[in-house]
Amino acid sequence: MKHELSSMKAFVILAESSSFNNAAKLLNITQPALTRRIKKMEEDLHIQLFERTTRKVTLTKAGKRLLPEARELIKKFDETLFNIRDMNAYHRGMVTLACIPTAVFYFLPLAIGKFNELYPNIKVRILEQGTNNCMESVL
């Protein structure tokens, strides 16, 4: 059984708006696409989530039970994404690298470029040293 977060969001918005037309507008999809998505979800779950009339939809008992869980799932997913994106903001500071001159020109540019993409708030200081002095310079 494959359920996508987009289907859960569609379910919640439809439940809150009580209208396929209004929910489709809020989701920025067509009404037939929303209808298919909800129908597929109901088929996969083997249970009807909405009572449908020509003017509005209401939740069935199963739909009422699913609604708070779906809201919590979406909330948790959004919080997780926010926290992951926010983690990068806390990575600050400086990294000191001591290396031999050939590494500065041949190996480090690509590695430091990737590092800067991942951690833009961390500065990199490069000390170009002979082999014997590298360890002492970093410590």
Image (cartoon, grey):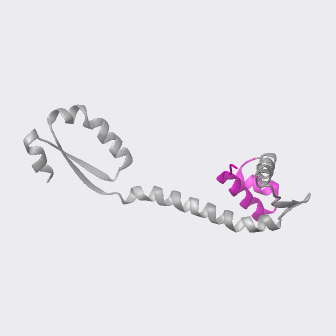
Q: Is residue 109 left or right of residue 42?
A: left
| Residue at the outermost right position | 54
Residue 9 coordinates in the image, percent (x, y): 68, 57
Helix, strand or loop: magenta stretch:
helix
Q: Residue at x 78, y 64 (%)?
A: 63
Q: Residue at x 35, y 50 (%)?
A: 119
Residue 14 coordinates in the image, percent (x, y): 77, 59
Residue 31 lies within the magenta run: no
Mark count: 0
Q: Is residue 99 left or right of residue 28?
A: left
| Res 57 → quadrant | bottom right
Residue 77 coordinates in the image, percent (x, y): 57, 59
Q: Is residue 138 left or right of residue 23?
A: left
Q: Residue at x 60, y 63 (%)?
A: 75
Span shown in magenta: 1-29
Q: Quadrant of the C terminus?
A: bottom left
Residue 22 coordinates in the image, percent (x, y): 79, 57
| Res 115 → quadrant | top left
Q: Is residue 118 above or below residue 87?
A: above
Q: Is residue 45 above or below residue 71?
A: above
Q: Residue at x 78, y 49 (%)?
A: 40
